Every structure is written in C-alpha cells, then in structure tokens.
Image (spheres, grey):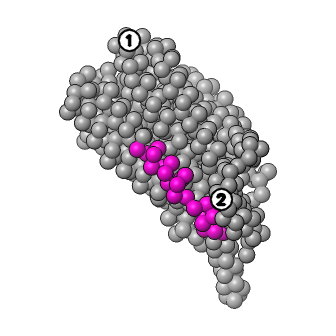
Amino acid sequence: MQVMNDSHQPSNNNKGFTSTQVMEELKELLSMAVPITAMNCLVYLRAVVSVLFLGRLGSLELAGGSLSLGFTNITGYSVLVGLASGLEPVCSQAYGSNGVDKWEQLSASLLRMIVILLMAVVPISVLWVNLGPIMLWMGQDAAITSMAATYCIYSLPDLITNCLLQPLRVYLRSQGVTKPMMWCSLVAVAFHVPLNYVLVVVMGLGVGGVAMASVVTNLNMMVLMAGYVWVYGRWRWTWKWTDGMGPLLRLAVPSCMGICLEWWWYEIVTVLAGYLVNPQLAVAATGILIQTTSLMYTVPMALAGCVSARVGNELGAGRPNKAKLAAMVALSCAFLVGFTNVIWTVVFRHKWSALFTHDHMLRSLVSSVMPIMGLCELGNCPQTTGCGILRGTARPAVGARINLGSFYFVGTPIAVGLAFFFNVGFTGLWIGLLSAQFACAVSVLYSVVVLTDWEGEALRAERLTNSALVLEMVTERDDEKGF
C-alpha cells in the first residue's frame, strides 16, 4: 500500500504556507498555465480566422456559418470537451501516485475515454446531419439554414478528430506536459490561413471550404500530439481497457454536465436577445460580447485545467497539504485575472467596441454592457478555476449541481425578468449572467475552501489508484487460470 506523506498529520492541513512554498507552487502552476493559455489563444485565433473568411464570402454565408458554429458548439464540442474532462482526476491522480503500474493505468484510461467519446459521436452525428430540418422546424430562415447545414456536414469528420484530440490534451496536461501541446497547436494553426485561402479563395469551395480548413487544422493538431506521445511519451499498450469503464463514466458524465450547462447558457442569451425590441442590434451586440468573453475565458480555462492536474498529482502522491496549496495559489491567480478583466473592460470599452463595428448604436450598446461583462469575469475566473479543483478531487458532480442551480435557477429568472418584464432590455440579460456568476463563484469557493477535507481527498485518491491496480491484477490472475 502506498505510504501517505502527510495525510496522517492533521496539523499540516491547517498550518500556514511559507512564502517560499507559495512562490514554488506559483512557478509550477505558471510553467503549466502559460503554454496552455497560449494554446487556447491559438485555438481562439483559429475560430476568428474562420469567421473572417465566412464574412469575406458574404453576409448570408457569415450568418449560416455562425448559426452552424453555435449549433455544433451546443450539441457536439461542449459534450466532447465535457466528457474528456472526466479523465482529469483519473490521469492526474494516477500519475502522482508513482505506482509501478501507473503507465498502464494512464494508457488504459486514455483508451477508455476515446471509446466513450466514439460512442457519444453517434447521436451527435445524427443531430448534425439533420441540422437543416431542425432549424426549419424552429422557424429559422431557409437560406441561412441551408448554409448552416452545409457547414455542419463538412464539419462531421471533426467529431472523430476530437475523440482523440480532447483526451490527448487531458492525458498530457495531467503529466505537466504543456509546452509540446503549445508547439503542436502553433504549427497546426500556422497553416490555417493558407488552408482557408486555398480552399475558399483558390478552389472556391465557399462555406464548405471554411469548415474543411478547420477540420484539417484540428487533424494536424491531433496527429502532432499523438506523434509526440508515441515518440517521446511513456506509453504502455494494454488490452484491459474495457475494465473500469463504469467508474470513468461516473466521472465523465457530471464533468460533461458541469461544462455544458455553462456553455449552453451563453447560447440561451443569444436566443433571448433575438426577442428584444431591436433584435438585430441585440444579437449583433451579443455576438461581439460573447467573442470577447471567449477570449477572456482562455486564461481561467487554462488555470482550471492546470490546477486540476496539480491537485490530482499531489493527492495521488499522498500530499494533501500541497494539493491545498496548489488550489489556493490558483484561486488567488484567478481573482487577479478577474480584477484585470474588470479594469480593462471599463477603461477600454469604447476602443474595444470600435474594433468590431462602425455602427454608432451598436458600439454604444456594447460599450455600455462591457463593465457588467467585466464584473461577470470577476466571478467567472474563480468559479472556473474552482470547478477545475473539484475535478482534480474527483468531485465533478458538485460543480455540475452548482452550475445548474446558479445559471438556470438564479441567472435565467433574473435575466428574463429584467429584460422582458421590467423592460431593462439588453442590459438585463447581462445582469442575469452577473447574478449567475456571483452565485456560482460563492458556491464553488465555499465547496473548495470550506467543505474540502484535503486529507480525506488524499485517502480517496489512494483508494482510487489502488482499486484500479487491484482490478488489473485480479483480471491478470483470471486470464492465467483460463490459459
């Protein structure tokens, strides 16, 4: 049985941390988070390039492509990213445990998640193929729907690519391997503009060409990461990948729900904006604000993934005090990022809106709401980071329940009430988001800072890693008896 370093010393969990310990942990966290943030920015840049080429084709193509992007995010990418997040506690705790069979456990867990995602792709593909009838049934414009359906059909191969890409990202991040991911993303995205130019401008493939360029870019990213794991990683092939599928699903499903519930709410805001007095202005402003939020989200998303890995590593190694330190340092960084977002959204709100449009009414509307959006990020940064900590402790269900209650039982009623019943209008929708983020942040921080028993979580991590090893040993003995 693994020997716990400090799990049997209750006093350690409550003692303060020295400045040296804090700085060491900050350095460790930043060494992981900076490359991941750069990777996220590159992925965001890829999406911006796609939108720019859609806009080059025309307003109809831009509207259809944007509709398809929203649909594929809701029904596909959010689900795959969410399910893959269930791999975080398993891989990070196994890697931190330093068990003799940890590489077999890591490899088997990666294969299990790939299989889970491949199964999830089947119903998602059915939805994507039927985007046209679904949008027409919902009353969408026929011409826009036709363009959206074309984009969606050409994007279908991307589902298979993401079944490998998303688990590979978690697999590498759980081992602190972040710089290679950044370089793989940089090489892949560097070819994105030339791909779009060839497929859209030279070959004249239109909306389908933009979708194909995104598919090929993701494929390049996946191949490069898989090649890195194959050549430089410590990979152990195992035929026991089917064992333990149930426990992994019990982590993957709540992880998926926690992420999807938040992603979907932003799409709901876009739909609600379409029912306001001036829907065209409101939807356009929502698009700009959501793009801005997505850019700001790259940092807390990186912090969440990295602190999940750090917390899981330390719990797996039996060091609850260091896991708590990693959590507190990450939350402090999240608050700092949140305050930074508040400052720049207030100071540069007019200049930022001018980057997107020359329409004075649209610029005025975006500028008026940006300070509220900045305050939302003050809650979103620690909330997103806190959810990463919960995943690192193998408690994604807690984050899912918090997101459900905050966004749908707090944020939605306030947004609808203010926007439509109290005639606050567009600003009311974002006040609803602010209330949801505040409720979510408070709940997540309470769960992490107050309710987390770090020594208990270390013992749970020990049981999780040991139970997996015992299962493999029992299976091997059964195989020996059979032969």
Q: Residue at position x 49%, y 34% from top? A: 378
Occupied quadrant, residue 93: bottom right
- Give coordinates of residue 288: x percent, y percent: 43, 24
Q: Which mark is residue 434?
A: none
Occupied quadrant, residue 332: top right
Q: Secondary structure at mark 1?
A: loop
Q: Residue at position x 28%, y 41% from top? A: 413
Q: Disc 1 marks which residue?
A: 359
Occupied quadrant, residue 137: top left
Q: Of the residues shown, which amino acid type is indicated by label 1?
A: Asp
Q: Secondary structure at mark 2?
A: helix
Q: Which mark is residue 13?
A: 2
Q: Left or right of 24: which side holds 272?
A: left
Question: Badge 1: few (under 14), some or many (20 or more) residues near its Cα, within 10 Å?
Answer: few
In the image, is residue 205 above or below residue 129? above
In the image, is residue 479 above or below residue 191? below
Camera-side residue of 288 and 161: 288
Question: Badge 2: few (under 14), some or many (20 or more) residues near its Cα, within 10 Å?
Answer: many
Magenta highlight: main SS: helix
Q: Residue at position x 75%, y 65% from top? A: 5
Please, which residue is most extreme toward the left here?
421
- Give coordinates of residue 474: x percent, y percent: 66, 81
Q: Left or right of 395: which side holds 329?
A: right
Closest to the camera, between mark 2 and mark 1, is 2
Q: Which residues are magenta?
A: 439-462
- Quarter of the figure that contains the N terminus: bottom right
- Give coordinates of residue 272: x percent, y percent: 29, 34
Q: Is residue 453 magenta?
A: yes
In the image, is residue 374 above or below residue 456? above
Camera-side residue of 429 and 175: 429
Between the residue at mark 2 and the residue at mark 1, the CA separation in whole angstroms equals 56 Å
